[in-house]
Amino acid sequence: MLTREEIDGKLKAQLALELNCAPADFSGEETVVTAPILPEKRRKFSDKPFFLQMATFGAGAVISADERLHPWLRAWAKGKRGFWLFEQHNYYELERELRKYGRQMALTHHMFAPKPGLTGKRTDLRVRWLEREEIAPFYGREEFPNAICARFLPERPDVLAVLALDGERIMGMAGCSADTPELWQIGVDVLPAYRGRGVGKTLVALLRDEAFRRGALPYYGTSLSNIASWRVALACGFLPAWVEAEARETKAET
């Protein structure tokens, strides 16, 4: 089983690969600015480099961005601790600069890493495990926007899922997408009638343990204001680990 240091090391190594920096850059106090790249072993959320992508593990920040932005970014970050760059008042300044290039900030992702070891979760719920080929019939169902992808994505396939069942009715689903062969991201959805019963926490804990047993490193992401999702993560053996964000093209105003 991985140690806390090994988990942190693997996550920093992956983010360093994607943001074109050294893993140690996330542990320093300074903000590091790099040029964007598109490594083959990245988590494949885009088929082209991000115009701007930034991440922090709670100390310094790393910003991978179009080189036209580098002088402005260095001036913007000067005198600020890296993790404060993700606060709204600093985002406002960044957003104004990005709009000069037809870009704006997208979602800020709050990411959770697992504590070492298994949760040992046991449940009286009736559950059904789904291997990758068994997940296909659930694509396109509006009840599961977070547990699985909207369709099969070969670049980050859904590889494992677990259902909670009330008779033949589905109470909820948690699923893992293999964002890399080693890093599996967990998502979960619980149908409205079954919320507040601990279904989501149970499914995530079960899936987290099974991912570890299969040699993968499970992780979990949510937004700043999704308190219910934060509670699920914290109750299932995950801790806040890093924050990442990226820019996207500005939507046309109507």
Image (spheres, grey):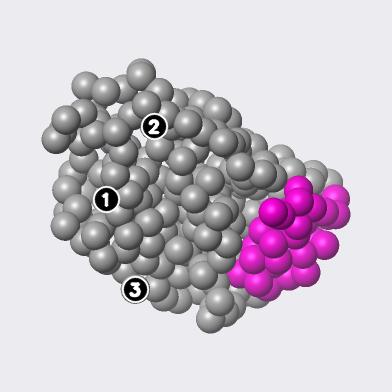
Question: Looking at this view, is 77 or 228 the one in front?
Answer: 228
Q: Residue at x 21, y 40 (%)?
A: 143
Inter-mark Cα distance, 1 to 3: 33 Å
Q: Name the amino acid, label 1.
A: Glu
Q: Position of residue 111 (x, y in %)?
A: 57, 45
- Which tag is nearer the camera, tag 2 or tag 3? 2
Contact? badges 1 and 2 (CB < 8 Å): no
Q: Name the amino acid, label 3.
A: Pro
Residue 200 is marked as 2
The residues colored magenta run 1-30
Single out the residue that lies furthest toward the bottom.
Answer: 40
Contact? badges 2 and 3 (CB < 8 Å): no
Mark 3: few/some/many CA within 10 Å (<14, 14-19, 20+): few
Residue 115 is marked as none
- Left or right of 25 on screen, residue 126: left
Q: Name the amino acid, label 2.
A: Gly
Q: Position of residue 218 (x, y in %)?
A: 54, 52
Inter-mark Cα distance, 1 to 2: 37 Å
Q: Residue at x 70, y 66 (%)?
A: 13
Q: Earlier in the sequence, mark 1 or mark 3?
A: 3
Q: Residue at x 35, y 19 (%)?
A: 197
- The residue singled out by tag 3 in the image is 154
- Which tag is nearer the camera, tag 1 or tag 3? 3
